[in-house]
Image (spheres, rainbow, N blue to C red):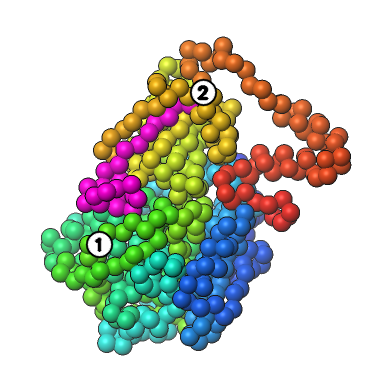
Amino acid sequence: MSDVWCVARVERKWIMVFPVFDDLRSWLALMEDLGELRVINGADWNLEIGAISRLNYKHPNPKALLFDNIIGYEPGFRVVTGTVSNARRTGVTLRLGDDLNNRDLVAALKGKPGEWAKSAPDFKPVEVAAAPFFENVLSRDEADLSAFPAPIWNEGDGGRFIGTGCMVMTSDPDTGVVNGGAYRLQLQEGGRTLTVNIVPGKHGQVNVSKWFEREKKAPVTISLGHDPLLFMLAGTEVPTGISELNYAGAAIGSPLEVVRSDVTGLPIPKSSEIVVEGWLRPDLTFMEGPFAEWTGHYTGSDKPVLGLELERVMYRNDPIILGSPPAKPPHDFSYMRTVMKSAMIQDAVEGAGVPGVHGVWAHEQGGGRMFIVVAIEQQYFGHSRQAGYIAAQCQAGAYMNRFVVVVDDDVDHTDLGDVIWAMCTRCDPAIDIEIMHKSWGGRADPVLADKSIPYNSRALIDACRPFERRDAYPPLAEASPELLMRVARKWSDALGFDATSFLSNARGQSAGGNVEEQMDGA
């Protein structure tokens, strides 16, 4: 691991936070040093890796899991899961700090997505000639993707999925801008190829369609293990026209090193563990799935999915697959998406000119997309509806959103119990719920009867005090924080637990299902 230390700016102070890492292996070494990694030996790729990962996600503070000595595979052929499923590892991965709880992480992220987007053109990737993945190079005839321990993640899955924490690179043939997206990849033909299930409307699908119109084929390069930051950004809506590779460089503070492929012409992150290259063609398709979706249902369509005409596979010695299987939340990336979406939506709402935004939280129970809460300090008539409509339809929040709830700033928008309380006591359903029709849905939506028409509707729930009655509204029946802390200091022994720490941690860590346990001392 590097002895060079990185600094980060948190609340206008520069602090030394963690050693520099630039690939998955140095990230894992750092997580081991921080006590954030567990090694699991001897699990079976067939369901056991997935089930162990599911048990891990249910823990209030899940660790990253590194699976080695996988049944049927040589030691060193590994799978990692849970890379960004808690606040500490997500903060480190985003280069924001190694001691952030949920609230600190959101505060540190405030404004960052916009800053990264603005500075991304200044962080064009730097091309290098060599990379560790050249240690093993297999031609089309030699390649067999089943040589890697791609798991069957869930009992209802229709096959082995090697691509869950991946980055699938395509390019816009008109502008040359490279897109990196996280799409599910299923082994096909016994591992001789794979399917690439790109969500319609995403940048990758737009790029592929343009290539089909121009060349009847689309170049694709896939990374299957890398700095987890690349996976985070591949699974997030980076603004149109900005490459995730540039965006990652802006987040890190230095340009990524890449190798220019002599097969597809696309850049490959130097940090990649496994690289798969080839061509998508409109006439090369396979039946795919089923596969557990991030909504917690099996909702894939019965239409064929594009397959990859495999050209080359390259990998490091002892390669590591970055796995990130979705399922009913909490799952592998639901926490990461919650944090990223919350920051991006808040930036979008404030960027649209809405004042008084106290916070945004895209709750993990909705997969980080389907249940968004906006807290505001009301300043004028219509303020709450304005904030809700923009949150519901901004680019970062529009896809598969189902509910947007707007609450006053005295409500903890990260605490689902507090939000439901506000809905029950400050929302009159007859006048405070508005329905938006024909919004941006997706085929993963379990409500859809016809997946060929993926619209959805969404409810805007105004759970704020009516602006005209905000001062006359019945007062809160709640002990003040000052009184609670004073009593906690005096009566903790009688209560049998450290009530002062409990209050402090509750204020700092309340954020859905990944609140860090007090007993862990984390």
The location of residue 372, given as percent across then percent down, is 45, 39
Q: Name the main secondary structure of what is drawn in magenta.
A: loop
Choose between 355 and 258: the one closer to the eye.
355
- Tell me the kind of residue under disc 1: Asp
The location of residue 81, given as percent across then percent down, is 51, 66
Residue at 83% from the left image edge and 44% from the top image edge = 496
Residue at 42% from the left image edge and 35% from the top image edge = 404
Q: Quadrant of residue 156?
A: bottom left
Choose between 347 and 200: the one closer to the eye.
200
Which quarter shows the C terminus?
bottom right
- Tell me the kind of residue under disc 2: Arg
Residue underneath mark 1: 302
Residue underneath mark 2: 426
Say above or below: 270 vs 479.
below
Q: Quadrant of residue 261?
A: bottom left
- Which span of residues is magenta-colored? 440-464
Q: Nearer the viewer, mark 2 or mark 1?
A: 1
